[in-house]
Image (spheres, rainbow, N blue to C red):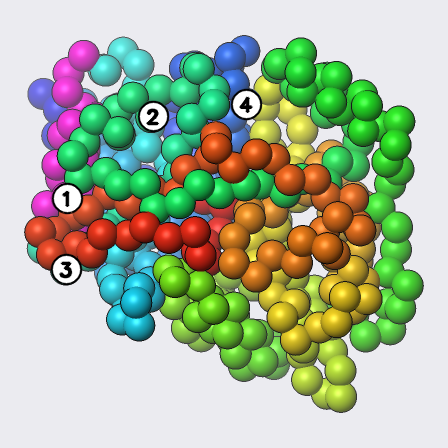
Amino acid sequence: MIEIRTFDGDPEELAVFCTNVWRTRYQGHMPVWLWTGPFFEWELFSDQPGARDFLVAAYDGTRLVGAHPAKPVHYHWQGETVFGTAGAYFSVDPAYQDQAVSLKLVLEQRRRHRERGAKFDMGYLIMGAQAAMGKEFWLRLKTMQVVSKLSIWTRMIDHRALTEFSISARDRWGSKLMGLMQGRPKPPADPSSIRPYRNADLHDCLELSRELSQAADFGIVWDEVSLARQLAFPNVPRTLVLEREGRVRGFVNFSKQPFWGRREILVGMIDLLCVQQLNARQTRDLLRAALVEIAEAGCHVATLLGGRGVPIGSLLRTGFIEELPSDYLYVAQAMTPDAPTLKTKRVHSIMR
């Protein structure tokens, strides 16, 4: 008998389960993340009160057969703070897909949201890949709404590895072509003001993050706890700051994540790029410093989610290209009757 309850394992167990489910379903048809224990610990297993309330899982006895984990997040919409969650790891053992496990997970997650006053669950849908199953399931729900179409910016580093990785012939030819025109990332022209993040930088970085988010119609509400975890956590994120006159004027935050297509690659995933107080030259220097570190860490490509505040000119000058936005949807599942209708092109989010 299937029991729906709070996940009772550790981050490594959850990462292995979700990764195995996605590889089983999609291997050879579309790229998938290879989630790790440290990444899930950073992303989902905070020690803050209520942080694990939304780690919903399905068990057959002691066997984990489904997971619908999400983390609590505060957002802003039309000047108001709204409580919700973010979840991107929905996974059901294929052997149990005929036992309504998916629906049971969704209903339990909705119950918990209503019980705690969380109005929606945010996530992403990939529309372009024919093999992607999520769009068929989620878009059938009357509670699901498309908030925005987002683009993804990519900076290729190892074009040969990306050619070997790419599943589609179009992407393989694109990687080969870019390899003829683009070399390794260049170092910053003036690295003297760029350094690793320190805990003492939190106040300045918090002001920058809030400024960036408030410029969007819908975005994350950062506080000291959530941003400190985002910028500095053991063995996962890396953050560089640009300092002027004793103050942090800009920063970039990224992590190294494995990805699987026809082979494994490493992706330097840029989550936060706060450069609104920097000029174009300083922005390019900060991006170049991050790209050099991403390359030295063994990553084959760097990615950044499009959205409010993305410095398009500086991205182009440092070798990023923008993928078309039609394939990547930012979506919200309304969980309470009074959940607002979200629809805007001006969003502030991170890539998961």
Image: 168 above or below 207: above
User: Is 102 one of the magenta-colored residues?
Assistant: yes
Image: 49 above or below 187: below
Residue 247 shown left or right of residue 50 in the figure: right
Q: Which of marks 1 and 4 is nearer the N terminus?
A: 4
Which residue is under mark 4?
31
Which residue is under mark 3?
117
Q: Distance between the residues labelled 4 and 2?
A: 14 Å
- For the residues bearing labels 4 and 2, Cβ distance under 8 angstroms: no
Q: How far apart are marks 1 and 4 (CA)?
A: 29 Å
Q: How far apart are marks 2 and 1 (CA)?
A: 18 Å
In the image, 235 versus 251, the foreground residue is: 251
- Local packing at callout 2 (Cα closer than 10 Å; few below 14, some 14-19, many 20+) is some
Q: Which of marks 3 and 1 is nearer the N terminus?
A: 1
Quadrant (top left/top right/bottom left/bottom right) for the N terminus: top left
Which residue is under mark 2?
134
Which residue is under mark 1?
110
Image coords of residue 307 (percent x, y): 52, 53
Image coords of residue 252 (percent x, y): 65, 61
Q: Residue at x 80, y 55 (%)?
A: 288
Q: Quick check: can you spot residue 20?
A: no
